[in-house]
Amino acid sequence: MAVKRVEVVINSRKYTVLADETEEYINKLADHINEKVKLVLGSGQNVIGERPVILAALNICDEYFKCEEAGKLLSEQLVAQNEKLELANKTIGELESANKAVLEHRNSNPQISFEEEEAILALDKAKARIKELEEQVASLQKNANNQNNRPYNNQNNHNNQSNRPYNNSYNNRHNR
């Protein structure tokens, strides 16, 4: 992709950005920054100069790192579920082999033993557990894909000033 020059306005100042991304995408980023600046300015503090942009950048970084950590956690959960699924598949394979032997034995001997009946029940339970684990893995994969498609858009914290640690603490130390 060719490098493009895109002019954006952030906190009433014009900036020229060189980017490989589309103009629409760069403007979307600038709009996001301006939303965060408005939240900082709306916090009631007397914030002037570049401080609103710096505080907005800190809030954006905070959201990004929290989302990144959530993505890592989802990945770890997905790996753990995959390990459980592999173990369950191995167990199911062993139980299917045992079931096959039981069925062959049953066909050659019409009377089934209590142990053989228990093995068949255990196989059915294992199959149900594997189906359960496969559904959990599918759900985790869907969540991980959704998380990867939203690198740091944390809607829950969008309007909640108390979740923005940099709104007031920086100002309180420097506006005394």
Image (tube, rainbow, N blue to C red):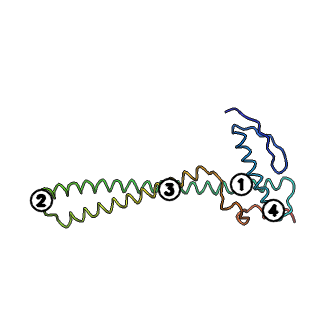
Q: Is residue 99 above or below residue 16?
A: below
Q: Is residue 92 left or right of residue 132?
A: left
- Residue 13 in percent (x, y) is at 85, 47
Q: Quadrant of the C terminus?
A: bottom right
- Which residue position holds label 4? 42
Q: Residues within 10 Å of mark 1 (few under 14, many from 20)?
A: some
Task: Please tell me which of labels 2 and 1 falls first in the chain.
Answer: 1
> What is the secondary structure assignment of the residue under circle 4?
loop
- What type is the residue that disc 4 sits on? Gly
- Residue 60's disc is 1
- What type is the residue that disc 2 sits on? Asn
Q: Disc 2 vs disc 1: Cβ atoms closer than 8 Å?
A: no
Separation (CA) of disc 4 from disc 1:
16 Å
- Which residue position holds label 3? 140
Task: Please tell me which of labels 2 and 3 falls first in the chain.
Answer: 2
Q: Is residue 41 left or right of residue 146?
A: right
Separation (CA) of disc 1 from disc 3:
26 Å
Q: Disc 4 vs disc 3: Cβ atoms closer than 8 Å?
A: no
Q: Is residue 85 left or right of residue 14?
A: left
Q: Quadrant of residue 14?
A: top right
- Which residue position holds label 2? 109
Task: Please tell me which of labels 4 and 1 falls first in the chain.
Answer: 4
- What type is the residue that disc 1 sits on? Ile
Separation (CA) of disc 2 from disc 1:
71 Å
> What is the secondary structure assignment of the residue under circle 2?
loop
Tell me the residue at 32%/63% (across/down): 125
In this view, which residue lies farthest toward the left? 109
